[in-house]
Image: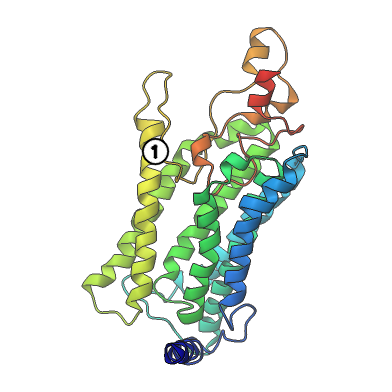
Amino acid sequence: MAQIARDFVHFYRDLMDNKSDPRVNHWPMMSSPLPTIAICITYAYLAKVVGPRVMENRKPFNLRNILIGYNAFQTVFSTWIFYEYLMSGWAGEYSFRCQPVDYSYSPMALRMANTCWWYYFSKFTEFFDTLFFVLRKKNEHVSYLHVIHHGVMPFSVWMGLKFAPGGHSTFFALLNTFVHIVMYFYYMVAALGPEYRRFIWWKKYLTSMQMVQFVMIMTHQFQLLFTECDYPKSFMVWIGLHGILFLFLFSDYYKSNYLAKSGKSKKSSQNGGACMPVLDDTTDGNANRANGKAPPHSDYDSAYIKPYSSCYSNGTSNGYVSSNGVSRETRKTQ
């Protein structure tokens, strides 16, 4: 048993010291995977246990202005990361056919590695998506899939940054940050209120864009199975499997909410894994309008399709952020 322990320690030290990229070893959070793992485990515990318990006997927070600011920040942050990925190689010398990692200390190679670190950091900022759900007592959206997705991504990206900060699989991050630009901009406009709904008429195409993204990721990664390329095959397979998983989930969502509906009926998928919520077309002001009354200010609560707000949505649950923190279901019972 002692020998097994020694062998494991030797393997771990060799992996961390000799197999990793020495350029990033002294960067924040990069010398060891333990801080990242600890933060991810703590996140999961707070999201599923501590947070709901603390909020159990408290009223939901009114976070409308915070959510507008948060989504605006994430939109700008994602735009900057996307730009850096382009300028670090994808808009220039990078090959879409085969792109090895440049482990040199050239300015361009270091810029790409630095961009990868900021992409890694962005996975932690996305923890606020869950925090806003918890503070608004939208615990039904903090599913195990939501927590696993957000909790695993930082470590997954850490592995890529530690051993291959650049090259072929950064195409995944390039596409992902572009999608996040559109996604967080959508959330920001949704949080502004119902009067801005006309500006997000393109909500249906968000899911289509996601599926196109995953097809592109799969195609780009798995092409290396049929060609020689000096890029770690393990990372290629890992990213390609991500594409397959999420393509399945989003395809199920798209079929259930755009292809399978007939007339006014809409079959809601039981697959809670699809992560891109969209606004429902109904509003809580309908009953008031029918009675000749103006809709209440909390018309914000026009619904996101609930089963699909489990991963990326961040507190603009039910379409808009309610100014009084009262959900549509609660109002119906009053």
Residue 3, compared with residue 99, is above or below; it is below
Question: So how many labels did they put on this image?
Answer: 1
Q: Secondary structure at mark 1?
A: helix
Mark 1 residue crowding within 10 angstroms, few (<14) / some (14–19) / many (20+)? some
Q: Tell which of 7 and 172 is nearer to you.
A: 7
Q: Which x, y percent locates residue 279? A: 55, 33
Q: Which x, y percent locates residue 221? A: 33, 66
Residue 148, compared with residue 193, is above or below; it is below
Kindly tell me whether residue 68 is visible in this rendering: no
Residue assigned mark 1: 254
Q: Quadrant of residue 167?
A: bottom left
- Residue at image point 74% right, 40% down: 64
Q: Residue furthest top?
A: 291
- Residue at image point 65% right, 35% down: 320
- Residue at image point 56% right, 84% down: 24
Quadrant for the C terminus in the image = top right
Indicate left or right for 241 with 172 as reference: left
Quadrant for the N terminus in the image = bottom left
Q: Which x, y percent locates residue 255? A: 35, 36
For the residue marked with disc 1, what is the amino acid? Tyr
Judging from the image, the colouring scheme is rainbow
- Residue at image point 35% right, 61% down: 241
Kindly tell me whether residue 308 is visible in this rendering: yes
Q: Which x, y percent locates residue 155? A: 52, 69
